[in-house]
Image: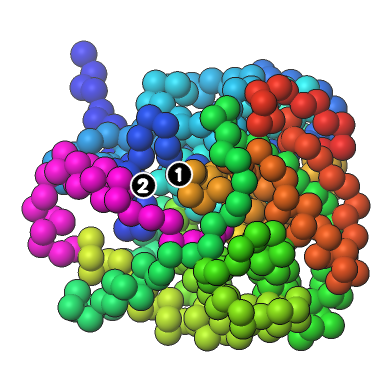
Amino acid sequence: MAKRTKPKRYRLDVSSQFYPIIATRKSQSLFGMTARMDAPVDRAALAAAVNEALKRFPTFAVRLRKGYAWYYFEENTAEYPVGEAGGRPLRPISGKERAGYLFRMDCKDNLIAFEVFHALSDGLGALEFFKAVLYLYAVRCGRSPEGTAGIIDLAAAPSEEEAEDAFYRYHRRVRLGDVQLKELMGTRPALIEGTLSEDGYAVSYGGVSVDGVRAAAKSMGASVTAFMCGAIARAVHNTQSRPSRDIVLMVPVNLREMFPSRTLRNFVNFVRLTFRHGECTTLADFVSSAAKQLKEKATPDEMAKFMSTTVSTERSLPLRLAPLWLKILAARIVRFFIKSRQTLIFSNLGRVSLPEGTGVRRIVFNLNVSKTSRVNIGALSLGDEMTVAFTRSVRERTLEDELFAVLEGAGVTAVCRSDSVGQPDINGTLAHNTSL
């Protein structure tokens, strides 16, 4: 009888070690991407595309296991079951829900919904997987996409660099005593106002012209990200009934652009943009502040300090010796007392490159939220349109409406608006929105 081969094991990357530790049955760090296709989705063809893609992306073909001190990934060879889109968006993914996989791929009508547990990958790594699935799905449906521009080499074997923990490659030693924890945590910021919903999250989006955003940003001497951060901060400021606290935006920075790596795992750092109460009054003020802070904070030197702190903390003797159950208990106690340290998160995945002929009309990128981080915003650009997507745990769309008003005042008019991206809205009703 042939000897059974033990499944391969993988360490979680340094930055994701705590994601499963702080996760609960009701709360899990997730993000999602929804693609609107030009025809109803064939679920069998999509399932075949997902399972084919998993052979090229072994870091996605895993299940989560408990070790003594940390969680770890174990190779998962089960057939992936594609489901039907529905239920609360960005709800936690249970270990048994998808044959142990840590992502959810669903379809309904013309939509393909992809949700990912952040321990698996960051947005850019997940986007590479999603694009490969969309391409393979198009081929399975008999389409002939024009080339493979923007798609990972599907004929190549998975490389070690794609699976590397790039934090380990680029970190340098730092003493824990030199870590400024107070500076990392920041102070309590302004929170988004609104009525908390007990029914789940709402997800919605608006589309704006890429050229329009670029022109507005250029007119203010800023990058697209700085312009959007300034516009968001301005919108938050306008919606505060009694403004008294600083507005704090957390903005992910793609470290692959500063420290060359082809890793498909987590390799980002968050930059904290703080807009002091009373310092900014106009949109130009907010954009200028965002541009200045990004220039000062999103530098290779500052990012290297972050990586060094992250790796040194994980390697510290107390964390190496503490059993996993104790880490989980400590995390839940801390989670009970800790307060939100940001007003919202804004993540821009940038331009998405896909071959013509894949049948993808639009992709929307959503982040999950909580009772304190009540609205988070995701953006990406496909073709000549940037989608700006909102996930919110409050019923009101006040911030969303105000942001588009601010953008319109800067000459950037929304080309489309949607109540839902095909997932349930705040009242649990599926909104079939043909505009997505």
- Which mark is drawn over residue 19? 2
Q: Nearer the viewer, residue 69 or 281?
A: 281
User: Can residue 265 be seen?
Assistant: yes
Q: Position of residue 410 (x, y in %)?
A: 86, 71
Look at mark 1 in the image and give the residue it sits on.
Answer: 29
Q: Element at badge 2?
A: helix
Q: Element at badge 1?
A: loop
> In the image, what residue type sits under mark 2?
Tyr
Question: Looking at the image, is 345 positioned above or below residue 117?
Answer: below
**Which residue is rendered at x = 51% and y = 51% of the image?**
373
Queried whether the magenta region covers residue 337, the answer comes back as yes
Instruction: Check contact, mark 1 vs mark 2: CB within 8 A.
Output: yes
**Which residue is rendered at x = 49% and y = 44% of the image?**
370
Mark 2, other Cα within 10 Å: few <14 / some 14–19 / many ≥20:
some
The first of marks 1 and 2 along the sequence is 2
**Which residue is rendered at x = 23% and y = 69% of the image?**
312
Quadrant, the C terminus: top right
Q: Position of residue 329 (x, y in %)?
A: 19, 41
> In the image, what residue type sits under mark 1?
Ser
In this rendering, position of residue 400 left or right of residue 274: right
**Which residue is rendered at x = 30% and y = 45% of the image?**
336
